[in-house]
Amino acid sequence: MTAVLDNGVVFLSEPIATSRTIAVGFWFSTGSRYEKENQKGITHFVEHLLFKGTNPSQRYPKGLSAYDIACSFDRMGGYINAFTEREDVCVHFTVPYIHFKEALCILSEMVSNSAFNENDIEKERSVICSEILATKDDPEDSAMDEFSEVLWPNNTVSASIAGSVNDVNKLQRTSLLDWYKKYIRNGALQVSIAGNFDVSEAIVELEKLPNRPIVKPGLLQNHKFELPVWHSGITVKKAEFQMEQIFYAFPLTIPFTRTDYYCWAILNALIGDTMSSRLFQSLRENGGYCYNVYSFFSIYDDCGVWCAYASTPADKTGEVLQKLKDEIANLRTATISDDEIIAAKEHICGEEIINAEDVEQHMKKMSRQFSLGFELETIEETLTKVRSITKNEIIQTLNSLLCIEKQVIFIYGPKLKKRIRKNI
């Protein structure tokens, strides 16, 4: 069910009477893409501060400390968490259904009445700086940040979500509080709930939240960003890691239909997202070139990317890159078998069935569908749609996707020998 409440909150719900748990997500229309140069990292910082305590209120006369929030969810046997993306912030919890009202009240208080105490801000600043440094120390995380900048240079879509240590150290309480008030306390809000709960009880609690602008379904409906420009070509960047990381990417067409989306998912499964996929079998099982090899796709409001990824010792970089190129070329020139397509479809359907048993995954799926502008689907509708995709539709999507003129090759890691660089 999708409904707009009297205070502007968009409410997505899926009651599951047989479940003994419930997942709730508060989705806010803000993220790192909304930030200007002097605001980098502010959304992620604010997300952290939501957990640091609340001001006194009628419901909680003494306010809630960070310890109170943690203890409450621990004693329920559930958990509360959050994440910041480029275009969204989500604060969510999963608890046994008997604790639904208490958990919802606490989350509502966190997003509506957060304290932003100066001491908490300084302690959390240190925590976030540690998080950023840990990311820099992780080869794959570090490479992913650099990869985005290569694809869409000088655009907010490619900016680091957490910002740099220098960015975080510049952010002051006034700007953090202003951001919180604009985008969290009073900003557009979509609430997604899946599990065993009473819809009317949820609405009563959600309508106690402050009035908000209404979130509109679909891409580019809630904010207009500077249009990112895809930067094709080859980029090699030196980094102090032992392994080379290779990205071989193509742009996705935006806007797109639900059929396009499922075609991308099917292609991704058969190319590199499964153990039986072409890339995994060719580069790892048969070639022994690398431990880590897979493919993925990411979608934003006005741009998207499909990418094949592999990490390998520097002396094998040339061979691995050529293997990636060969596999992509084979997709265009050789026929994809019916068995491959069936296997990829059934893999996706199997994942959907498993996720349908997980209330958190169910909650997230509803929100993702809404954000893409799609009607909410039942699990049966999703399975039917995936299985109905034709081979011809998949081939057409493949030919549109793999445009060699738009390909991006990004290599990140130790300095390459001249003979390898020459052959890239």
Image (tube, rainbow, N blue to C red):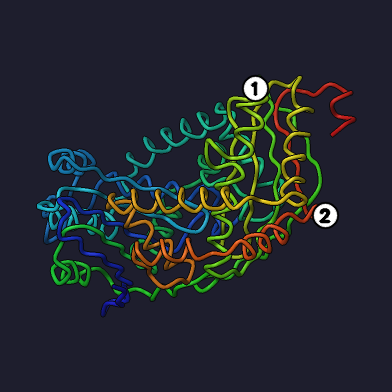
- Corner quadrant of residue 399: bottom right
Badge 2, how many Cα within 10 Å: few under 14, some, many 20+?
Answer: few
Q: Position of residue 17 (x, y in %)?
A: 15, 60
Q: In this picture, is 201 found above or below 107?
A: below
Foreground residue among 256 and 185: 256
- Corner quadrant of residue 416: top right
Q: Give the mark count.
A: 2
Screen quadrant of the N terminus: bottom left
Q: Position of residue 244 (x, y in %)?
A: 69, 27
Q: In this picture, is 156 found above or below 171?
A: below
Horizontally, is 94 left or right of 223 in the view?
A: left
**Mark 2 belongs to which amino acid?**
Glu
Foreground residue among 31 and 113: 31
Q: Position of residue 210 (x, y in %)?
A: 27, 70
* Picture residue at 38% right of the left edge, 69% below the top: 376
Q: Are marks 2 and 1 in contact (CB under 8 Å)?
A: no
Q: Which dot marks residue 405?
A: 2
Horizontally, is 15 left or right of 180 in the view?
A: left
* Picture residue at 37% right of the left edge, 42% below the top: 121
Horizontally, is 346 left or right of 50 in the view?
A: right
Q: Which dot marks residue 288?
A: 1
Q: Earlier in the sequence, mark 2 or mark 1?
A: 1
